[in-house]
Image (spheres, grey):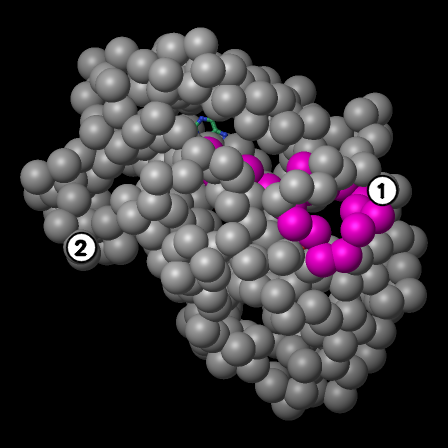
């Protein structure tokens, strides 16, 4: 039985990944310092004999862990969280990633980096393909995350070139679903919680900025395929190509919850990307992957989850 290490395994994506890996027959070690994650997310597998949880900060070298595969997901992912803790965020992306790569080198394992569409910054090309080099502000409030993730990718390719480490890089676009933290400020969770409470929906700016939302089950399938089914070390975009305006997302959520939509407009945060949309030709052609869950179904599942926990 192969062992898989998931850093950030108690977070939103990590918790789904750990559960899926156990279900398909792997032994899973989850490392998480619970900075933005929660044991609640992994409650269902905590006692599973094939699961081990280690409360550890990846900025401290990882010792006495043996794994065949490593998914490196540890990093705060919501703009609200990473802008509150910018130094911790860039440190985790650089020092934490170095520690993960050292472990992988020692274990002769394969490692997948959870990179992000944020490496494209506020993109000037649409949709964004893996070849696009991006438009990132290195000194802005998002830089701890954007530049941190770019540096993490650099480390991955340098460990590959210098030490032959076996790498995979997924550039993940906005993903949503159950186990998102209800207070982490991301748009889907914010809008659902606001609508469920009957509060006004906080649209930043005019709401014409776009994102492309991928349901978590689809994303996890993509990550697993990329890790186990493909010998491709170049980055692969994973996301749903359906691009929507933020004001459309707000109206859909209110419609599904059955609320009359009341909007509270707030200032658009600086460097907030105006458009974001993945070109997923590589994932489709090489991984035979594309998202199956449409926005309405994904939102219904997510609303059900937030109703249950609130
Ligand atoms: P999340 O905040 O829910 O999960 C991140 C997890 O990492 C948390 O459990 C947190 O406690 C843990 N963590 C943070 N710093 C750590 C450290 N120094 N040591 C150990 N654990 C640490 O976020 P998520 O949405 O699940 O994102 C997971 C990964 O996927 C992140 O790397 C993120 O950048 C990437 N990603 C996510 C999205 C998305 O839409 N969800 C999009 C692009 C990329
Ligand atoms: N947003 C919004 N209202 C909110 C939260 C976010 O209008 O309450 C907008 C935000 O300005 C951005 C988009 O929704 O344009 C997605 O924001 P999120 O924080 O989820 O992730 P991002 O894609 O910016 O990393």
Task: Please determine whether, in this image, residue 41 is positioned above or below residue 168.
Answer: below
Residue at image point 34% right, 52% down: 225
Residue at point 26% right, 24% down? 109
Cβ of mark 1 under 8 Å from ligand 2: the answer is no
Report the magenta residues as a range: 113-129
Residue 275 image position (x, y, % from top left): 79, 57
- Left or right side of 59 for 185: right
Give the SS element for disc 1.
Answer: loop
Q: Which residue is mark 1?
A: 271
* Horizontal relation, residue 165 to residue 243: left or right: left
Which image quarter: residue 131? top right
Judge whether 225 appears above or below 294 on screen: above
In the rendered structure, the answer to whether residue 286 lies left or right of residue 270 reads left
Residue under the image location 56 percent in, 58 percent down: 280
Q: Is residue 87 magenta?
A: no
| SS for callout 2 | loop
Residue 192: name its quadrant. bottom right
Farthest front residue? 285
Counting labels gives 2
Return the x and y of residue 30 as percentages of the image width and height.
Answer: 29, 35
Q: Tell me the residue at 21%/45% (across/down).
A: 46
Quarter of image, res 136? top right
Q: CA distance from mark 2 to mark 1?
A: 40 Å
Q: Nearer the viewer, residue 76 or 151?
A: 151
Residues packed near mark 2 inside 10 Å, few (<14), some (14 to 19) or many (20 plus): few
Residue 264 in view of the camera: yes
Q: Position of residue 31 (x, y in %)?
A: 33, 30
**The N terminus, quarter of image:** top left
- Which residue matches tag 2? 24
- Relative horizontal placement of residue 227, taking residue 273 as reference (left or right): left
């Amino acid at each position: 039985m192969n062992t898989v290490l998931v850093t950030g395994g108690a977070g939103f994506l990590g918790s789904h990944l750990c559960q899926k890996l156990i279900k398909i027959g792997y032994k899973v070690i989850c490392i998480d310092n619970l900075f933005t994650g929660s044991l609640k997310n992994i409650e269902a597998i905590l006692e599973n004999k094939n699961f081990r949880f280690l409360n550890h900060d990846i900025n401290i070298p990882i010792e006495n862990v043996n794994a065949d595969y490593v998914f490196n997901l540890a990093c705060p992912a919501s703009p609200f969280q990473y802008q509150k803790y910018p130094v911790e965020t860039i440190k985790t992306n650089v020092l934490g990633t170095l520690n993960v790569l050292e472990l992988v080198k020692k274990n002769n394992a394969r490692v997948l980096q959870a990179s992000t569409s944020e490496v494209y910054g506020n993109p000037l090309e649409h949709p964004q393909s893996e070849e696009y080099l991006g438009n990132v502000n290195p000194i802005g409030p998002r830089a701890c995350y954007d530049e941190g993730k770019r540096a993490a990718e650099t480390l991955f390719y340098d460990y590959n070139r210098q030490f032959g480490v076996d790498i995979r890089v997924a550039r993940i676009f906005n993903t949503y679903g159950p186990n998102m933290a209800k207070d982490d400020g991301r748009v889907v969770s914010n809008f659902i919680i606001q609508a469920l409470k009957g509060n006004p929906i906080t649209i930043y700016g005019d709401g014409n900025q776009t994102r492309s939302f991928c349901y978590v089950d689809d994303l996890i399938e993509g990550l697993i395929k990329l890790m186990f089914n493909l010998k491709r070390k170049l980055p692969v975009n994973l996301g749903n190509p359906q691009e929507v305006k933020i004001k459309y997302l707000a109206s859909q959520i209110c419609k599904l919850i059955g609320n009359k939509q009341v909007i509270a407009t707030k200032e658009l945060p600086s460097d907030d990307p105006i458009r974001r949309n993945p070109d997923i030709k590589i994932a489709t052609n090489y991984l035979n992957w594309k998202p199956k869950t449409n926005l309405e179904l994904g939102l219904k599942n997510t609303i059900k989850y937030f109703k249950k926990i609130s």
